[in-house]
Structures are given as structure tokens and as C-alpha cells.
Amino acid sequence: MEAVRTEGINYNLGSLIQGQSLVAAAEEPYAKRALHKEIRFSEYAFFLRTVKSIGVSARFKQVIDYFKTPEEETPAGFRIEYNMKPNMHLEIDLVRDISYDKNGKKRATRFIFSADSANPYEIEPIKNLIGNLTCNPGIIYDLFINNPKANVGRKYKNRNEVMREIGRILGPGCDISVEVNDPFADFNQILEEVQEFKEMLSEYRVVIKVPHTGPVNASNVHQLLQGSKRLSTRYNEASTADYLHGHNLALKLHEHGYRVNYTLMFEPWQTGMALQAKPYFINSFVRQRVGITTYINGLLHAYEKTCDERFLSDLRSFLIEWDFLSGEDGNASLRLVERIAREAITYRKINEKEGFDGMDGVRHSLRMLRNSNLKDTRLIVCSMEGSKNYPDLDKLMTEPEFADMTDKIVITTEPNYLARFTSAPQVITYHRRFMNAVKNAGEQ
């Protein structure tokens, strides 16, 4: 039968059936969930000529059953795909993709919001608006479990209780990025830990956060836990094996079938090598980085104007505090301090258009991602605060250069920080007017 294109008519798989029994009775309850999905006329015409039967993949059934999906729906977080099988059999599949809402419909925007939280009470009001959640040991233990103001009545006793509740709240449409407690542990121990996450959250939602490790290793990590808590090794004087520990851990987990969120990316130069680890997410941290850069810039300007070396001495203490220098560098040369500081502000372009807003790392990572072969990898822009970070990112996403990359952006921070940018001063102004109008109408 030859199909004729008619303007204004939408086509879907259900259009093919035309009263015929193309779907086996046993698979019909599954298949009918996807028959509504609109297809192009060219696809319709091709299927009309070639399809003799329609069914669903084993994964389709598994996803529907696991998430207890309501009848005649497919869950959020999955796109619907078709595979031609032998004997002209069309197989309907569900593929993990957080760009999609339920029933194979795209989310409202190409970019996706995420939340940095392990607090179920905070996550509840934002659950239907995000496609990812990220948490690390600091978020889980410091900000929630061991924080009596957040973990009211100490209802949640351990990480697993928290993660199970978060999984229940978020449902199928949200990826959940969670970090192991010790990235320096034996790999078999790490595998046991991530397997536990997989069992709690399902293979479809779990993403394992792996941190860049820099100069930190299993032998010196204790220095961060005692005394001054300063590492004796500078960030740029480590061994090759230490620098690449996180990369190799990410690759191993990828080879074991896990999606990886490769985290702790603060500088653009980290992006290229991070992509070699085949991550599902890479990151660009903007909060502390822009604040630190601005402070360094200010001290250098003060020194330039006054030639007072007390500003360089203050800068030395600041560089030790933020790990540009090691804990052993209390007497480092002020000339070295000045050089390190100038290199930082020059590279970070804080005095140039590219980086005055602290988004130079984001721009660079998007350019690198555009030229990668990792079609599913996205950039998480994370750890924002203050009155400028999110508005500056919002503006960046409208820059013509990145018009083709907005579907690669995930915006994550604390839920309350995101929520505050839903408001403006005049919201109060207008409510004052409207509510008083209603009040006065009732008094007449």
C-alpha cells in the first residue's frame, strides 16, 4: 500500500494497525503504551511497507514493571525508539534519556535542572522540575544526616535510608548521582558499594560520582583529616599515577556498565583528559572559583597601587588556605606568590570578557564537549551561590555560540538557591495590589 502525505494529519504507530493484529496478545498491554507516539510521515510510509508485526523489547517490559508505570504510559526519563528485527518485526524499546518526560515527550527545555541535596524534605517540592540529583559525602553526612536542623528527629540514621527515600520521592525520570565514601579503596570494595547503589536506585537511575584526585592518594589522605588538615604536596607536584587515579577509576566503572559523573572540575584544562574517561557527566564548578579569583585579583591590584608587600603576605596565606600552595609553604617567596597569583587571574580571564562573569570554564567545556565523540555526555554547571552566578549562566545559555549546546547543560545547586530565582521584587508589589483589591471588594 502506498501512503499519501496529507497536510495537517499526525501519524503514529497506531496508524499502522488499521484493525490488523500486528501486536501479539501477550505484548499488547506493553506495546499500546507507545503506539501513540507521533512519527514522521516518511517513517510511517516505510513502516507501512515493511512491518508485519510489532512487539516490545525485554528492556521495555523491565522498565515498565520495575517502575510500576500507570497503564498506557511510559515513564519519564526514557525515550521511545524502534528497532527493525528479522522477519519484518518492529521492536519498541525504551532508552534512558533524562531529556524526556513521560510518554516519550521532550522536557520543557533543552537544558535540565538538577539539585545538590540529600535532604528529602528539600527534594520533595522540586522533584517534578529536575532531571538529576547529585550528592556526595559532604552533602549526605554534613548537610543532612548529622545536621539536626535538617534531619529532624534524626529520622534517617544512615546513607542507605536516605538514598532509598530519595529514590522513592524522585521516581523514574531523575538520574541520581552518588559518590562512594572512599575513592582510594580497593576496587572490589568500590564495586560492592556501587552495586548496592544500583540495587537501591536501579541501573537506570544510578550514576556513580568519581572525583578527580590530583595529588591526594591513599597514603597522604590522612593529612587532610588531622592537624592543620593541609596537604604537604602542592596541587601541581604530584605523581602521574595519583593525578590519573580518578580517570582510571572512572574508566573501570564505565567498563563495568556504570554511568559516571566525573566531578571536581574547576579549571578548563581538566576537561580534555576528563573526557577520555568516557563520563556520562562532566562538571564545571563556578561558585568558589569566581570568588577566589576575584579576591586574588583585588589583592594584586592593591599591591600594584601601593607596592606594600603586606598584600602579598596576605595573598600567600590565602593561597595556602585554598590549596594553591601546600601546607609546607608558609615561608614561600613573595615573588613566587605573586607569580602564582598572576598566572591564576590571567588564565581565568577575570579581567576579560570571556571570564569576567566566572563562566570561562563553562564556555571552554562546552566547546570541548561539542568536539567530542561522546553523544550522551552532558556538562553539569554546579555549586552556584550569590546574586550573580545563576543570572550569568542564564545569559550564557542565550549566547549564539552555544545555541547548539543547550541540550548538553545541566544546572545544579541547592534547591533553595534555584528556587529564589523564580521570584522578583515586583512579585510582592503585584500581590499587594491584587490581594487588597480582593479584600476591598469583599468589604463593599
Image: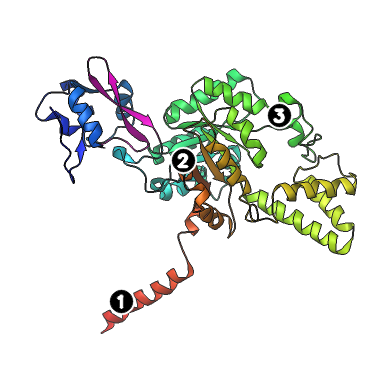
Question: Is residue 251 something that shows in the picture?
Answer: yes
Residue 374 placement (x, y as % from top left): 50, 31
Taking 295 as reference, is 270 left or right? left
Residue 353: image tag = none
Q: Which residue position holds label 3?
A: 243
Q: Compare marks 1 and 3 and give the one earlier in the sequence.
A: 3
Q: Give the quarter of the figure containing the N terminus.
A: top left
Could you tell me residue 31's position as x and y percent? 22, 28
Are dots 3 and 2 in contact, CB under 8 Å? no
Residue toward you, 145 or 274: 274
Q: Determine the CA span between mark 2 and mark 1.
A: 40 Å
**Residue type at tag 2:** Asn
Q: Give the mark toward the camera: 3 or 2.
A: 3
- Tell me the magenta residue range: 73-97
How packed mark 2 is, by other alpha carbons closer than 10 Å (few <14, some 14-19, many 20 or more), is many
x and y, in percent, of residue 106 in the image: 35, 42
> What residue is rendered at 58% in x and 38% in y?
368
Q: Which residue is mark 1?
A: 438
Label 2: state its secondary structure.
strand
Q: Residues within 10 Å of mark 1 (few under 14, many from 20)?
A: few
Q: Is residue 37 visible?
A: no
Label 1 – label 3 distance at C-alpha: 64 Å
Residue at x 30%, y 32% (from the top left corner)? 68
C-beta proximity under 8 Å, tags 2 and 1: no
User: Dot 3: what SS?
Assistant: helix
The answer to whether 61 appears left or right of 250 in the picture is left
Tell me the residue that label 2 is attached to: 132
Left or right relative to 257: residue 301: right
Amino acid residing under circle 3: Tyr
* Residue 408 screen position, x and y as percent: 48, 41
Which amino acid, by three-letter code, is at mark 1? Val
Task: Give the main secondary structure of the magenta stretch.
Answer: strand
